[in-house]
Structures are given as structure tokens and as C-alpha cells.
Image: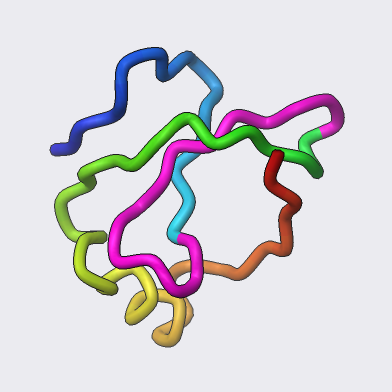
Amino acid sequence: MGWAPPGTEHMDAVFVLLGSDVPWILRPIGDGELYKVVGEAYIDGYMYGRGIDQMREGTLSKKWIELH
């Protein structure tokens, strides 16, 4: 269960950004190394830092990205 901001499109991705309490919807630009911020999202189970906990447990992986 979740909520994405208006304008979210097919192939947009959900990211848990380090330092943020909420997940974000990002849109890949070009080859997928650059991303445009679409907006904040509500994803049940990933709010209030729980996504970071899952990263520490090894269920989510880290990826370095550049935002535009």
C-alpha cells in the first residue's frame, strides 16, 4: 500500500534517501545514472527510517546517484 505524488509515471523508482524519513519517487534521466526528483511518497513499511533499517539488515542495497 502506498501513495505517489501526482505526475508519477511508469518506470519511476522508489528510493530511500539517506537522511530522509520518507521514501522518494525519482525518475531516471538518460542512462539511469542521473535522476529527477518527482516528489515524496508514502510506502507502508518504509516510513520513519524503516527503509534504512532494512538496508542495514541487507534487504535493501545502496546505490550512489546524482539528482537533478
Indicate the quadrant where residue 52 lies. bottom left
The coloring applied to the image is: rainbow
Q: Residue furthest bottom?
A: 56
Q: Residue furthest right?
A: 31
Please give left or right for residue 57 compared with residue 67 in the image.
Answer: left
Where is 12 relative to 15, above or below?
Answer: above
Residue in view at x 20 percent, y 32 percent: 3
Image coords of residue 56 (percent x, y): 44, 86
Q: Residue furthest front?
A: 68
Instruction: State which region is magenta.
Output: 17-31
Please give left or right for residue 13 compared with residue 2 in the image.
Answer: right
Residue in view at x 67 percent, y 63 percent: 63
Image coords of residue 9 (percent x, y): 47, 14
**Does 28 appear in magenta?**
yes
Residue in view at x 57 percent, y 68 percent: 61
| Quadrant containing the C terminus in the rendered view | top right
Image coords of residue 34 (percent x, y): 77, 40
Image coords of residue 36 (percent x, y): 63, 33
Indicate the quadrant where residue 5 lies. top left
Where is 44 relative to 61, above or below?
Answer: above
Indicate the quadrant where residue 48 lies. bottom left
Where is 44 relative to 41, above or below?
Answer: below
| Quadrant containing the N terminus in the rendered view | top left
**Does 16 appear in magenta?**
no
Residue in view at x 28 percent, y 73 percent: 49
Number of numbered discs on residues = 0
Please give left or right for residue 19 compared with residue 23 in the image.
Answer: right
Where is 39 relative to 46, above or below?
Answer: above
